[in-house]
Image: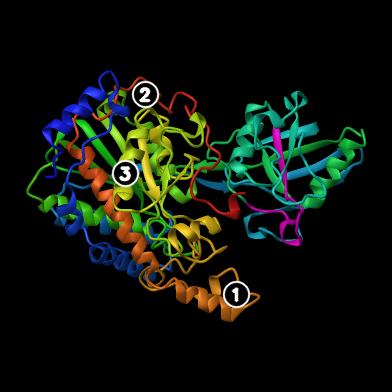
Amino acid sequence: MHRVGIVAAAVIIVALIGAPPAAAAPAEFDSTGLERLVTVEGITAHQRALQRIADRNGGTRATRTPGYTASAAYVKATLEKAGYRAHYEMFNMPEWRETAAPVLRQTAPAAKSYTAGSAADDDSPSVDFIAFEHSPTTSLTNVKVIPTDDVVIPSPGGTTSGCELSDFPAATSGAVALIQRGTCTFTEKLDNARQAGAAGVIVFNEGDTAARGNALFRSGPAGYPLPAVVSSFAVGQELYNAYKAGQNPTVDLATSGVDEDRFYPNVVAETKRGDANHVVLLGAHLDSVTAGPGINDDGSGTAFQLALAEQLARAGTPPRNKIRFLWFGGEEDGLVGSQYYAAHLSDSDVARTDMMLDTDMIASPNFARLVYDGDGSTFGSENSGPEGSGTIERVLTDYWARRGLVSEPIPFDGRSDYVGFVNRGIPAGGVFAGAEAPKTADQVAKYGGVLGEQLDPCYHEDCDTYTTVTRQPPATTMETYATNPALAQQQANSLRGNALRSLQQFKNTLVHTVWYFAHAKNAFPPKTNTTNTKTAGNAHQFKNQGHRGDRDR
């Protein structure tokens, strides 16, 4: 174990007298032995197994599919073989069943019925509107329509209608809120409308391009209490123009559906030794999107945690603090499994939990080294974690900095499984190799890679495969393919082996961080907030809920 000299340590201690543990500069714990044991080859062996599971189950490991069930069984069996007492903890992800066609009828300034569609009519030009998944059975009659204050027609793209509670005028209370599709998620728009006192919701397609004009089938939050639909741009424009003309549009709006309980497993295991009053949590999500096998998102975090768990079971030095490994389902459906788990922790469980380390997407082919801004020093306190999260950030970034590797902060924006733990006041942190964001010139200078291409070119696509992670992404998924296939092939070739380099760099800082906090004593200040999200509102308001793509915005 690397140790700071006694004299140097004394200087550090004197300099830090009076500072809380979260602000202290921690002495480095030597994790090099464990880093050597947790290999890229060991991680990719588990990713290969996840690929085979997807191949046998229709190319996906999404939560509601047999591929997820098989993935959970694989993780549990692997842990048990390594000597852990792994178990399932079930979470509820209700399935919505539409019991009758929805109704949207204009009653003023003219009588007009709109054509209803169902999930099968997603993005069809032949229907005018479709009910949100999880809409209740309820109806409204002759209710006024009130648009948000920031509808933009014609739209330049990227409107923010309904993204802030302040977008809704006072007249929204008791009315049907009319919201334009745009940058933030549908679920955020729906939640803001609910908080504004709306009686119902119409979200209309943005209309900025021909591809964003039709009615859509999209998911709302389970248990959403208001009738809510997604309409075509034409319907929204008609109602908006009537409002702006002072014609006071009114509508009948009805949805018919019921949520039926469906339970799926999170997988849980913890080290046999370690202080149970100081628990270090690691969380990865085990599910993929329906479109593909998810071997980076989040097969990379899943496989890393398995490889680390295996080596910790063999290591000769037990941790001071207990380490608990978590694999969540329902992340791609809105962080369902992790939020369910965190909400059902007792207050005493929360008090015993030192931290949560999120391991989501660490093998992106066009990667950047991104670290959550735990202390809010870059993005402000509204985008930070609970007190102590800055300590996690510093351990992660300092590891890379000591090895000459630059990194950059990203906000806690609500897009991964840390959300439920942050809402319980548990310090959280993590690293992220990137998803759909295009790589900037500054990032190319720092990390290499392809300018303007997504950090993960196969994000939420069927090419998020073992081959992409261990070799390169296909040219057909590159942004330049439609206009210059030869350039796209050159760019894809330039990324060969890059996801493995990402995996090597990310797994080392994660191993070190786990090792440090598993051996640190009093690394965090006492908790003052253990808000139980079963009975209270979220302590943090996040813009997104899960790493979700255009279907959710």
At 14% from the left and 54% from the top, the residue drawn is 33
Which residue does the numbered mark 1 point to in the structure image? 481
Q: Residues within 10 Å of mark 2 (few under 14, many from 20)?
A: many
Which is closer to the viewer, label 1 or label 2? 1
Q: Residue furthest bottom?
A: 486
Q: Residues within 10 Å of mark 1 (few under 14, many from 20)?
A: some
**Type of residue at label 2?**
Thr
At 21% from the left and 58% from the top, the residue drawn is 38
Give the alpha-carbon distance from disc 1 to disc 3, as whole Å: 38 Å
Q: Is residue 387 above or below residue 488?
A: above
Which residue does the numbered mark 2 point to in the structure image? 530
Which residue is more in the foreground, 519 or 133?
519
Q: Position of residue 291 (x, y in %)?
A: 50, 63
Give the alpha-carbon distance from disc 1 to disc 2, as whole Å: 49 Å
- Is 208 covered by the magenta stretch? yes
Q: Mark 3 or mark 2, which is nearer the start of the sequence?
A: 3
At 41% from the left and 45% from the top, the residue drawn is 371
Q: Position of residue 471 (x, y in %)?
A: 38, 73
Q: Is residue 472 above or below residue 206?
A: below
Magenta part of the chain: 198-217
Do labels 2 and 3 touch, CB within 8 Å? Answer: no
For the residue labelled by badge 3, is the local secondary structure a helix, a strand or a loop?
helix
Which residue does the numbered mark 3 point to in the structure image? 398
Which residue is more in the foreground, 451 or 251?
451
Dividing the picture into quadrants, the one containing residue 213 is bottom right
Q: Position of residue 282 (x, y in %)?
A: 29, 44
Which is closer to the viewer, label 2 or label 3? 3
